[in-house]
Each structure stands twice: as C-alpha cells, then as structure tokens.
C-alpha cells in the first residue's frame, strides 16, 4: 500500500515516516480510528505532501483500511488513541469549582505526585476565541501574585460514566454565557494550573487591618504585572483572588482581553455577548457598553478594597453597602483616608483613575 502513494520527497523511508506522522496526528486529534475519512488524502494533496496524480489511480476507501491497519501496527501504545490524556496522567481528587465557565478539579499527577488544578472548558464554535484567549493570556504571565500556568491541551470527548467530571452547572454569580447546553461529543480544553483551595471571598472577615492592606498590595502587584503585559482581566472579584500558602494569586482569566500595541491603545467596548464580569464589581463604563480600557480593573480594585475593609454579616448587606458606595452613600464611621482613596479608584470617569503602578505608590502612603 505504501508504494502506491508517492510523497513529494526524495527518500522513500522519509516519505513513509511523513505519511505516518500526518495520519497518526489525525487519529490522535479525533481520538477515534473510525473518524478518519478518505478526505485525509485530499488534505495531504492540498498541503502539497503528495501528488494529485497518485489519487487518480487508487481506491481511497479500500486504501483507508490498509492505512488504519498500518498505523495500528506502528503505534507502540494503542491506548493512546482511545485513552484521555487527562485520565491517563491524573487522578481526580475532588471538584473545587464550577459554573458557566466549566469545571475546576483538584488532581494529583501520577508521575510527579504533586497536586494541581485542572480547568476543563467545553469549546464550541461560539466560544472558541474566548477560550483560546484565556490560554494565550495566561501563558504570557509569570508573577508571584498570579496563578501559575503549566500547560493546556484539547481532547475530543463524549460524556459517559468514566468522564462525568465534565458535567458542570451555571454560576449564579456570573453573567458569562452558560455552556451547559453544549455538553455533546465535542472538544474540551484542559488547563493545568497551580492549585489554590482558598480565596479572598472565604477569608476576608477573618483578617486584621494590616493583613487586609497587605493582601490589597499583593492584588495590585498582580494587576500591575497583568497590565504591563497589555492584558485586562475584566472579572476581578474576591472569588477570583486566590490564596496559596498566604500568598495572593489572581486567577480566572476567562474574560481577559489582550490590548494590541499599535502606539495608541484603542479602548474596548463591552457590547460582547456573554463577556461581562460580575455586575457588582464591573465598572460603570462596561455596564453601559461604553469605551473602556485597563482602568476598568482599577474600578474593581476599589470595590474589592471597600469590601476588604468592611466585615459584612450577609451577602445582602454587602450588596446594599456596595451599591450605596456607588451612589456616594457611605457609613459615617468608615475611615476617611480609605474612603478618599477608594473614591479615586472608582471615579466615574475611567480616564481619571490612576494606573496600577501609581496605586502601588499611593497605598504605601495610606
């Protein structure tokens, strides 16, 4: 069978190896031998790997069977075609997060025996750009106050009893589009990250003033690094401020955007379906659908600092006090120096908010 196909190369052995590589890649990508179609020949021709004249003299359907058999004979570990890389490399400990964005699992790597977080996102034609954006933006960042990214991959999976970890539920606190209706045999993106089992949302009422201010400084350092890399987070909130061994780690870059550098950063508009963060922490310009830039994150920082410096007993109390803050209604006993600082961060005009580097300087003088 191999002799019937002539590759555009001079060495016969190289020809065979090249053909095997391309066909094996297609098999592995689809996780199924049955999904390989005769169109693979046309693809090889289109990419200038074999001559069209060779296809005119062969029965592609019959040769497809030969190709499958040949590949199976040459794959050292046939399980690689049917076994999920995720299940092959990791043991699932438990689910630590879920929502419209997907599922986050605590896992243990079978090789190095260390624990990691793996975020699993259903990828479809509607959200591909958003999902890939998160991967790309995370890969640009390496800072002590940003959750560490180790790598990512895609698997084509059909839900069954062995992979019911893929099932997830809509997040009632997020306005991101729910993907729950898209759980059909499709592509899933797996992001391997540093494990964080706690967040600011769970800790803030048990911290001293000094600890709270130190946490805020760490958040600002992380945001400063994000903005230096021309990225806007767009979903800063206590549940996305993770804590690892006492160190603040900004996480969840699902709504982040990269600002192209063309000599003049062009503001974004927020009229993108399913791309608005949590209402309570989003800037007014985002909520209105107006132009905005990285200073939308600065507004969120102001709300987070206000929440940090208060000990709210209930979610209802927190929501009311934050909404009052946005209207300029503040409790009389709230310390004036912090209130003045917060008002600077949540200025209605985003162009008058300081950048993250300036905030670092300002917070030292409070």
Image (tube, rainbow, N blue to C red):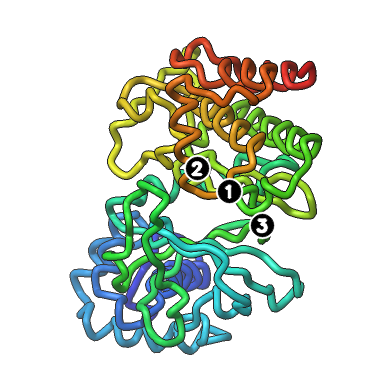
Q: Tell me if residue 182 comes above or below residue 262 in the rendering.
A: below
Q: Which residue is mark 1?
A: 313
Q: Tell me if residue 203 comes above or below residue 82 in the rendering.
A: above
The residue under the point 34% across, 73% down is 5
The residue under the point 50% across, 21% down is 261
Q: Which residue is mark 2?
A: 317
Residue lying at the far front in this picture: please name it: 332
Q: Is residue 10 visible?
A: no
Q: CA distance from mark 3 to mark 1?
A: 19 Å
User: Relative to residue 362, is residue 169 drawn left or right?
Assistant: left
* Sequence-first disc among 2 and 3: 3
Residue 164 on image: x %, y %: 43, 79
Location of residue 82 by image quarter: bottom left
Q: Which residue is mark 3?
A: 198
The residue under the point 63% across, 79% down is 91
Residue 326 on image: x %, y %: 45, 25
């Amino acid at each position: 069978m191999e002799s019937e196909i002539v590759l555009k190369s001079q060495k016969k052995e190289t020809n065979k190896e090249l053909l095997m590589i391309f066909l094996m890649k297609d098999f592995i990508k689809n996780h199924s031998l049955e999904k390989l179609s005769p169109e693979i020949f046309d693809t090889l021709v289109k990419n200038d790997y074999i001559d069209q004249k060779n296809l005119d003299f062969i029965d592609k359907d019959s040769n497809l069977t030969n190709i499958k058999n040949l590949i199976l004979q040459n794959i050292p570990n046939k399980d690689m075609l049917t076994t999920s890389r995720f299940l092959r490399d990791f043991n699932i400990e438990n689910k630590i997060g879920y929502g419209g964005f997907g599922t986050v699992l605590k896992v243990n790597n079978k090789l190095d025996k260390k624990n990691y977080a793996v975020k699993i996102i259903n990828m479809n034609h509607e959200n591909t750009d958003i999902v890939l954006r998160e991967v790309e933006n995370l890969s640009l960042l390496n800072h002590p106050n940003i959750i560490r990214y180790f790598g990512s991959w895609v698997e084509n999976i059909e839900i069954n009893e062995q992979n019911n970890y893929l099932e997830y539920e809509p997040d009632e606190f997020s306005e991101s589009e729910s993907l729950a209706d898209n759980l059909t045999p499709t592509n899933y993106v797996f992001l391997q990250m540093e494990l964080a089992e706690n967040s600011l949302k769970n800790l803030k009422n048990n911290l001293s003033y000094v600890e709270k201010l130190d946490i805020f400084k760490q958040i600002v350092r992380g945001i400063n690094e994000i903005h230096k890399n021309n990225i806007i987070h767009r979903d800063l909130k206590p549940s996305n401020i993770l804590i690892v061994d006492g160190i603040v780690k900004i996480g969840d870059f699902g709504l982040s955007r990269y600002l192209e550098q063309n000599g003049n950063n062009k503001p974004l508009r927020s009229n993108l379906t399913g791309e608005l963060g949590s209402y309570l922490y989003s800037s007014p310009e985002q909520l209105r659908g107006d132009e905005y830039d990285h200073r939308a994150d600065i507004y969120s920082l102001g709300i987070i600092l206000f929440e940090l410096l208060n000990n709210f007993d209930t979610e209802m109390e927190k929501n009311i006090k934050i909404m009052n803050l946005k209207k300029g209604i503040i409790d009389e006993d709230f310390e004036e120096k912090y209130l003045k600082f917060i008002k600077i961060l949540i200025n209605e005009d985003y162009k008058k908010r300081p950048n993250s580097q300036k905030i670092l300087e300002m917070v030292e003088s409070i």
